[in-house]
Amino acid sequence: MTDSLTLALISAGCILSGVLLGLLLHKLLPAQHLENESKDAIKLGAGMIATVSALVLGLLVASAKSSFDSTEDAITQRAAKIIFLDRLLLDYGPETKATREQLRQTVAASIEMLWPDTKSSAEGLAAYERMNGMQVTQMTLLQLTPTTNAQRQLFATAQQILTDLRQSRWLLILRAQRVIPIPFLVVLLFWLTMLHVSFGLFAPRNATVITVLFVSALSVSGAIFIVLDMSHPLQGVIKVSSEPMRHALELLGQ
């Protein structure tokens, strides 16, 4: 969240500076530079920049939302697999009691890392990356020896689900490393700043207009923050819901 908020504040500062620069240039430029012909040319250029900026910003928001939704779906599927795995182990027999308890501890630990109740808790992808709970769960299950055809089938299915869970965990971790290139953001920020320079250049000098320009700058910066924050669905302010995993935890061991 810190990086996203920092970049959003920097964006807000640059865009607001563009508004102030436009207001200042209005006083400094010779009168002939602000005649109707000049205004038309500048507005044409500003319109082009506004169109390109809106298109790029819209695509970034859509991409970030798509990444967010994919992670949310992955968490839901993960929770469903965990519940199904627990039921398979229950069907196997009382021999899986230790495995089921280990599974419950692993799920509880992952929830505490990714969705901590208190800020002082160990949290974040770094801790989640280091944990090996599913590996321990799988190794615990491997200590069992199926004795019937039904147990062998349940054993094989449970092992496959555990393998899928271990693989999907790394997929979540690697997907969270997605980063929007800084040069791309710099170019977009330059466009938005120049656009607000043109707004300030021809805007009437009164409190209402200046307030609207400042709100516009803050709104665009807010959109940049949303893009940056949603690009990391397991961190920051805008996070995927923990409800599927918490509901799965409630059902484990029953």
Image (tube, rainbow, N blue to C red):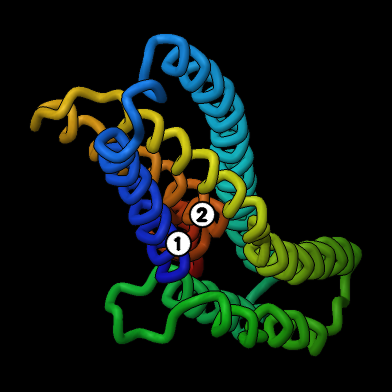
Quadrant for residue 197, please give it: top left
At which x and y percent is residue 42?
48, 22
Name the residue located 32 percent from the left edge and 24 percent from the top edge.
Answer: 31
- Image x and y of residue 252, in percent: 50, 65
Q: Residues within 10 Å of mark 1 (few under 14, many from 20)?
A: some
Q: Is residue 91 visible?
A: no
Q: Secondary structure at mark 1?
A: helix
Residue type marked 2:
Leu
Q: Nearer the viewer, residue 8 or 160?
A: 8
In the rendered view, tell whether residue 114 sits above or below residue 91: below
Most extreme residue toward the left is 207
Q: Residue at the spot x=30%, y=73% of the render? A: 117
Q: Secondary structure at mark 2?
A: helix
Residue 227 x/y as whole percent: 51, 47
Contact flag, marks 1 and 2 (Cβ < 8 Å)? yes
- Residue holding disc 2: 228
85 or 125, which is in the foreground?
Answer: 125
The residue lying toward the viewer, choosing from 14 and 117, is 14
Q: Report the residue at 82% width, 84% height from top.
A: 142
Question: Between tags 1 and 2, which lies in front?
Answer: 1
Q: Quadrant of the N terminus?
A: bottom left
Q: Is residue 36 above or below residue 242?
A: above
Q: Which residue is mark 1?
A: 7
Q: Amino acid at mark 1?
A: Leu
